[in-house]
Amino acid sequence: MKTLPRRAFLASLSGTLVGAAVPTGSMMSRSRPAIAAPQKARLKAQPLGEHALLVQGAGCNVLALRDDAGIVFIDGGLKAHGKALLTLAQKDLNARAAHTLLNTHWHADHTGLNELLGKQGARIIAHENTRLWLSTTVRYQPDGPPIGPMPAGGLPTQTTYSTGELRVGEETLKYGYLLQAHTDGDLFVKLTRANVLVTGGVVAGDAWPTADWVTGGWINGTVAGYRALIAQCDDNTRVVTANGARLYTRADLVAEADILSKVADQLGKMMRAGYGPADMLAANPAKDYAGKLGDPVDFLTQSFKSLWPRLAPDA
């Protein structure tokens, strides 16, 4: 096994940001995962109740609800699909305007409705760290182009550090903080009457999750996030993941949490033993689960990086 010194390891982390503003409590500055150029939206709508709609194909899974005042969105997909998404929700829910948007975190594939709805006067709810990241100019890679801030009109207008509650007609939306799970500003949203749980980016959906270590997420936080989500479920809860074509159940979350916990434990042991990234990938502690969640290389790479500031022997 080849041990990699800390400086050499840090030099290998291509996601490291240089010269970026850093919100208090964050690991580094805002990073949005690389997203392929969006194709024409192929939106698919699925009712989740009398006044609730799950929309897929917009860049992430989006939930739309209707009350007497209009539409409430949970996440917003990619900006390129925003108008099509809004039009579909208006038609299928028989509503004209959207008055509220909840951001589960700041990544571009979840915040594509912010500018559109912000200009229309909608309230935008998010964790405070999400607002900070969206208002910051960063570089995702040291030599990469800057990622500019969200225009002021699209920034969250109401933020939380912990939990909150929102009435939407006869439905109650309860949202809460998942500490450093996918980012450092993740929220889940629970529809208490419909018994639907929205995980945001923490649960990918039939794929490996991503601990966005550049913006405060880490693999052990992901595991803890899963456990917090499981605590919100019973055996009848329908779980909306970030992507994926199917709704999860509590049993799905439990099964994935078990896998992630085992892999995180192995990664921690490798980090403490001085493994370098190449040695870790060669050992492939996730190889037994590739058949269920796919190629683990990116997951392992990002998860291993996320451990460095916390577990490395010389950190």
Image: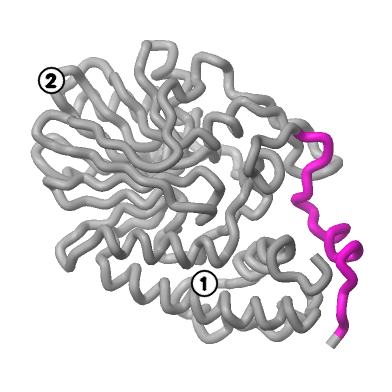
Q: Return the mark for residue 68.
A: 2
Left or right position of 205 against 55: right
* Position of 88 relative to 188 (above/below): above
Residue 55 position, x and y percent, is 30, 41
Coloured how?
one colour
Residue 12 is one of the magenta-drawn residues: yes
Residue shown at the point (39%, 19%) measured from the top left? 117
Q: CA distance from mark 2 to mark 1?
A: 43 Å
Residue 202 position, x and y percent, is 46, 55
Residues packed near mark 2 inside 10 Å, few (<14), some (14 to 19) or many (20 plus): few
Task: Identify the element where label 1 is drawn.
Answer: loop
Three-letter amino acid code of the residue under disc 1: Gly
Residue 41: which quarter of the image?
top left
* Position of 99 relative to 265 (above/below): above
Residue shown at the point (48%, 41%) measured from the top left? 105
Q: Which residues are magenta?
A: 2-20
Q: Which residue is mark 1?
A: 294
Residue 104 position, x and y percent, is 42, 41
Residue shown at the point (65%, 35%) measured from the top left? 23
Residue 271 is one of the magenta-drawn residues: no
